Image: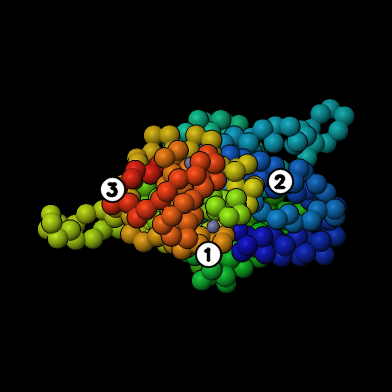
């Protein structure tokens, strides 16, 4: 998210130096996770400042693209006999995850509606994105490997975006036709023509907890792997801890309220590693209350669950609990 925010800032500062772009470009920002919301409504480039991008749980293309279609319907003005409408909008769609729902109703709405009336660019970050799905959505699809390790790729993506928007704002002024820019080779995607599989993300298991001391939310992320079971003498599926992150209130706003529906439940028996609380550093962030809530503890003893406010004794339980996973 930070890399995307930086990129957005770079594009805007470049475009603001372009007199054609200043006159013609309007910008809007929509974010989506499990839900979607408009962070900045359509705003003139001159008075647009890049917002802080919130994060949320889940990756619902259904809701993200649905929200986008509504925004285009209500904000983009078509030509009438008296006035010339808006130029062809440029949609930049950035995703770093596989969809967490199977909804595909957006596909026909999009393809029969806006797909041919906008210039659509999709950027996939990381290996978890379903490229064939992005190819259904966008006319230009690009890909970068990792946000952190490849900032030069990120940079060339956003450089391409500003060059492309800039070129469009100039050519539109003269001919009304948009102009294509060649995609940088390091970002190009070979289309393998694979059929669309809208699998839910089952590579990760994510749990939402709350800090007992500070009542702030956090996420614990596990990544699927295998290990050899000495008892069964075969590979079994396990989830290894890959991180714990404090989250702010916007997370809940953007998270899918259908979270966990239809998702497999994971037993703590299959989890490897428990992190410290990322909010208060308590040593055990995966204490499960009888209400089902997850919170942090500093060790065995009397604890108050921040979800249901019940106080009870927690020991190092020998039994295995089943946890509902959240969308990542
Ligand atoms: Zn804590
Ligand atoms: Zn509780």
Q: Ligand 1 within 8 A of label 2's CB?
A: no
* Residue count near mark 2 (Cα–Cα under 10 Å), binned few <14, some 14–19, many ≥20: some
For ligand 1, tell me if the residue under mark 1 lies within 8 Å.
Answer: yes
Q: Left or right: 274 with respect to 14?
A: left
Q: Quadrant of the N terminus?
A: bottom right
Q: Which image quadrant is residue 71 in? A: top right
Q: x, y (%) of residue 180?
A: 64, 55
Percent x, y for residue 183? Answer: 57, 61
Name the residue tied to disc 1. 281
Please tell me the numbered disc located at residue 48. none
Q: Nearer the viewer, residue 319 or 217?
A: 319
Q: Secondary structure at mark 1?
A: loop
Nearer the observer, 236 or 148: 236
Which residue, as the protein is rendered here, is positioned at the far right?
A: 82
Per the rendering, the mark at residue 319 is: 3
N-terminal of the pair, mark 2 or mark 3, is 2
Q: Residue at x 38, y 44 (%)?
A: 323
Looking at the image, can residue 236 be seen? Answer: yes
Residue picked out by circle 2: 39
Q: Nearer the viewer, residue 51 or 253?
A: 253
């Amino acid at each position: 998210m930070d890399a995307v925010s930086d990129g957005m800032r770079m594009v805007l500062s470049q475009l603001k130096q372009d007199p054609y772009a200043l006159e013609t470009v309007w910008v809007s920002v929509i974010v989506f996770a499990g839900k979607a919301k408009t962070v900045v409504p359509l705003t003139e480039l001159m008075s647009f400042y890049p917002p802080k991008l919130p994060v949320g749980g889940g990756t619902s293309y259904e809701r993200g693209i649905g929200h986008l279609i509504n925004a285009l319907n209500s904000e983009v003005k078509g030509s009438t006999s008296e006035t010339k409408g808006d130029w062809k909008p440029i949609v930049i769609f950035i995703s770093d995850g596989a969809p967490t729902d199977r909804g595909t109703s957006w596909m026909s709405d999009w393809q029969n509606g806006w797909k041919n009336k906008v210039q659509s660019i999709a950027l996939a970050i990381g290996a978890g994105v379903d490229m064939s799905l992005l190819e259904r959505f966008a006319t230009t699809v690009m890909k970068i490997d990792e946000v952190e390790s490849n900032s030069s790729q990120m940079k060339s993506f956003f450089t391409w975006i500003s060059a492309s928007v800039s070129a469009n704002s100039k050519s539109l002024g003269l001919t009304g036709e948009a102009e294509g820019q060649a995609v940088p080779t390091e970002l190009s995607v070979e289309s393998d023509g694979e059929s669309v599989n809208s699998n839910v993300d089952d590579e990760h298991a994510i749990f939402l907890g709350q800090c007992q001391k500070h009542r702030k939310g956090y996420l614990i992320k596990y990544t699927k792997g295998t290990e050899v079971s000495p008892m069964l003498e075969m590979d079994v599926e396990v989830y290894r801890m890959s991180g714990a992150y404090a989250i702010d209130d916007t997370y809940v706003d953007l998270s899918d309220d259908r979270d966990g529906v239809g998702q497999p439940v994971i037993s703590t028996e299959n989890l490897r590693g428990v992190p410290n609380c990322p909010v208060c550093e308590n040593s055990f962030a995966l204490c499960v209350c009888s209400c089902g809530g997850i919170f942090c503890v500093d060790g065995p003893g009397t604890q108050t669950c921040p979800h249901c406010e019940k106080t009870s004794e927690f020991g190092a339980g020998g039994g295995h609990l089943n946890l509902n996973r959240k969308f990542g």
